Image (cartoon, grey):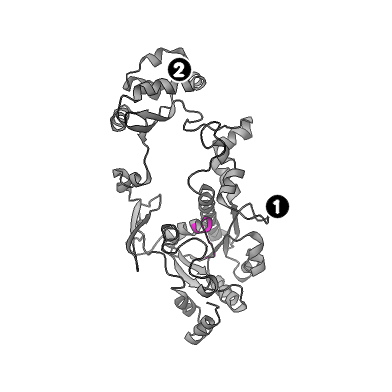
Amino acid sequence: MTTENGVLPLSRFTVLDLTRVRSGPTCVRQLADWGANVIKIELPEALEGNTGMGGERTGPDFQNLHRNKRSMTLNLKAPEGLEVFQRLVAKADVVVENYRPDVKARLGIDYESLSQINPGLVYGSISGFGQDGPYLKRPGFDQIAQGMGGLMSITGLPGQGPVRVGIPIADLSAGLSCAMGILTALLEREVSGKGQWVQTSLLQAQIFMLDFQAARWLMHQEVAPQAGNNHPTSIPTGVFKTKDGHINIASAGQAIWERFCQAIKAEEFLEDERYADGASRSVHRDALNAAIETYTQDYSSEELIGLLNAAGVPCGPIYSIDQVFDDPQVKHLGMAQPVMHPEMGEINLVAQPFTLSGHSNKLRTATPERGADTDAVLADLGYSPNEVESMRQANII
C-alpha cells in the first residue's frame, strides 16, 4: 500500500498495540494496513509460553489479524517495563487496548495516566460493556454481545430459538468502530492539538449494527421476530430452490417484481390480488414463496441467475467459502492478498474492503515473530545493547 513516493496514508502515525484476541486487533489492523507504524506489544515468551491469547501464531486467524505490524516484548507489570512503555508513549500518536476496564488502571497505563505524559495521545479502548456503569467488571465475549444486543433473537428460522451469526460480528464491528473513532480523533487533533479517549464496546457496536431493526423498535415499538431467509420488509426476497440447489432473489419494489414475474413466465402472479402490491405480498408471503418455487425449480441455479440478471432482477448464488474466492469478480477485486512469511513462504490473507485511488492496497509484511523488533524499538529509544540484554535476562523483554 504505497504511493509513487512510498508514503502511505497513515505512515505519519505511531500506534502502540496492547490488544489481544479479536476486537482490538481488528481495530489496529485497519491502521496498520494503511501504513501506520504499529508496534505490537506482547508478553515475553518466558511469561506467557508459546501460545498466548489469540491462537497459534502461524494459524490463519493470527496471521490475518496481525499483518503489517512490528512486534516487541515487554512486561508491563515490572517497573522497568512500564518505564519503557512510558517512553514509547511520549513519542506515540495512538494507544489501543481491549483490557477489562479495571486492569489498565491497575497497570498504570490508563488514559488519565498516559495523557499526562503525552497530551496529544489518542487512546482507543474496547470493552465488553463500556468503561463504567453496572456491568463495568463483567468480562466481554462476542456471543454474549450478540445475545444481549438483540441479534440472536432475529437470526435463524421462525420458532427455531436463538441463533448466533457465523462470524464474531460484535468483535469485528467494535474493532471497526474504534478505528473510525481513532481516525476521527486524529483529525480533530489537527485543530485542537489535543488527544482524547475513544471508547466503544461489543454491546454498543452490536446494537448499532441492528440498524433499522433497532429503529423499528425505538420509533414504533415493533419487535422484529426471526424471519429466516426472508427479508423483513422487501417481499419476495429470500432463498429459493432451483433444480440443483438454491439461489438468492431480491425482487424489491413493484417494477422489479413485475420484471421478475415476466422473466420466469409467471405473469399470473401479476393478476392475483394477493400479490398486487408490497403490503399484500407481505401478508401472503408464505403462499407466494411456495408458488415461486414451483417455477424456480425448473431451472438450474446458473440458468436462473443468468435469466434474472438479464432481466435486471437482483439475484446471486449461495457460495461456500471456497467458492467465494473462486468467483471471477472476487478475484478481480483482489480480496485474497498474498504476502511472504519467513517460514511458510507465500500465504494469502483477506484484503481490505476498500481502495484508494492514489494507493495500492497490497499487503506489505506478514505477522512478525514474537519480539522480532524489540531490539530495534529499544535502540530507537536510546537503550544501549547492554541495557537491552539486562532487560532480557530479567524477563522485562
The foreground one among 264 and 157 is: 157
Give how far across and how far down residue 308 sits, in percent: 32, 28
- Kind of residue at badge 1: Gly
The foreground one among 156 and 36 is: 156
The residue shown at (59%, 69%) is: 118
> Given the current orientation, which residue lies at the most extreme right position?
134
Question: Seen in the image, is 316 located left or right of residue 131?
Answer: left
The magenta segment: 17-25
Q: Is residue 282 above or below residue 41?
A: above
The foreground one among 282 and 116 is: 282
Q: Mark 2 packing: few (<14 Cα in 10 Å), some, or many (20+)?
A: many
The foreground one among 369 and 188 is: 369
Residue 275 is labelled as: 2
Q: In which quarter of the image is the N terminus?
A: bottom left
Give how far across and how far down residue 121 sits, in percent: 57, 65
Q: Distance between the residues labelled 2 and 1?
A: 50 Å
Q: Is residue 337 above or below residue 162?
A: below
Q: Does the magenta stretch include residue 188?
A: no
- Kind of residue at badge 2: Tyr
Can residue 259 be seen? no
Q: Do the residues labelled 2 and 1 touch (CB within 8 Å)?
A: no
The residue shown at (49%, 56%) is: 26
Residue corresponding to mark 1: 133
Q: Mark 1 packing: few (<14 Cα in 10 Å), some, or many (20+)?
A: few
Nearest to N terminus: mark 2 or mark 1? 1
